Amino acid sequence: MSNDVLIRLENVTKKYGDGDAAAVNNLTLDVHRGEVLVLVGPSGCGKSTTLRLINRLIEPTSGTLYLNGEDVTSMNPSLLRRKIGYVIQQVGLFPHRTIAENIATVPKLLGWDKGKIAHRVDDLLDLVGMDPDTYRGRYPKELSGGQAQRVGVARALAADPDVLLMDEPFGAIDPITRDRLQNEFLRLQQDLKKTIVFVTHDIDEAIKMGNRIAILREQSEIAQLDTPEAILADPADEFVENFLGSGAILKSLTLMKIADTELHQVPVFKAPVMRDKAIETLQDSEDSTSILLDADDKPLRWLDLAALNRTSQPIEKSGRPISVDLQPEDTLQDALTAMLQSSVGLAAVTDRKGKYLGCCTIESLAKLLVEQGAGK
């Protein structure tokens, strides 16, 4: 087995009854160190069953499972699971335990001392963007869906496992929060470099999240296993084409980040603003829209000439509020969605502290797509 392979399923089959068809049939699959391998396919194809076979929540009928070259089919399943983080759609937090106690579940089982556990809990809450002082003593019922999912990820990372298994972890969350959590997780993975097997039924999520994608037919038969770029460019057969659906170009937007494109600079004003000067500046610009920033350079409002000429209200209350801003690690799919929803056809981009960097435009997005197409 190659040193690059951390997990191997070798001729693995799972049957639930003697006369039943196999849920997973003779599956051989390698998962490389540090990659996100996404299992995607229609409902009932066996992708979640495959995931649960890896940490032996269910036992294979036949075949062998390897972790870091070791046959784990004879290992104590409980000991195996303590080496593997597991995140599910409904999170599964213990309702009677605080957030800190939930995150500490596996470290306690491993016998860590209280000081080490407390430090790890705070580090993980920071890592997933939740203030430890605010959240460590709360209970799951006091969290939003997105916050609960972040805690679920923190709990899975608590004992610093090499492997994470994620079964539709963002599936039950509203689309905006889902996009944010996906982007946050990809940012974390750049630093953590965990080996992740990720299950989804959503091909767009698979393309966004995976270094490689395994598209599965029934019984976890692999229809195609490759990078997202390769699958979009050259589907293996009609089944894969149908599963991908139409709009391969739009799907490719999830592979590119805002950081890959050139930001457009519209006129910007910082409160307080001299009305005459602002009008003159915008009239001399090729843009029809400007941005009002607050004292910390965070975008507040879109201002056009009509808003600036409206003397019945202060400039700080004129125009339209900027309700959504993007960050460089967000995808071009996120940018397109924001632009289509924006009242001005632009999307403001900020750094992680909210400081304005520039705007995404339809023109810059189209230019990048043309350049990508020319480079193929």
Image (tube, helix red, strand yellow):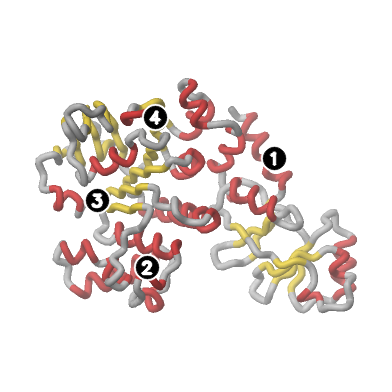
**How packed is label 2: few (under 14 Cα within 10 Å), some, or many (20 or more)?**
many
Residue type highlighted by circle 3: Ile
- Nearer the observer, disc 4 or disc 1? 4
The mark nearer the N terminus, 3 or 2, is 3
- What residue occupies the far top of the structure in this picture? 237
From the top left corner, tell me how far across and down residue 126 is, in percent.
Answer: 39, 68
Residue type highlighted by circle 1: Ala
Q: Look at the numbered discs 1 and 3 and tell me whether their residues touch, using CB distance below 8 Å.
A: no
Q: Which residue is mark 4?
A: 225
Q: Which residue is mark 1?
A: 366
* Circle number at residue 274: none
Q: Which residue is mark 3?
A: 84
Q: Which residue is mark 2?
A: 125
Taking the image as shown, residue 31 lies to the left or right of residue 178, namely left
The mark nearer the N terminus, 4 or 1, is 4
Q: Is residue 29 above or below residue 81?
A: above
Q: Residue at x 44, y 62 (%)?
A: 145
Q: Nearer the viewer, residue 133 or 201?
A: 201
- Dividing the picture into quarters, in which one does residue 214 lie? top left
Give how far apart the Cα atoms at labels 1 and 3 are.
Answer: 42 Å
Give how far apart the Cα atoms at labels 4 and 2 are.
Answer: 35 Å
Q: Quadrant of the C terminus?
A: top right
Q: Look at the numbered discs 3 and 2 and tell me whether their residues touch, using CB distance below 8 Å.
A: no
Taking the image as shown, residue 321 lies to the left or right of residue 134, namely right
Q: Residue at x 64, y 29 (%)?
A: 374
Q: Look at the numbered discs 2 and 1 and tell me whether their residues touch, using CB distance below 8 Å.
A: no
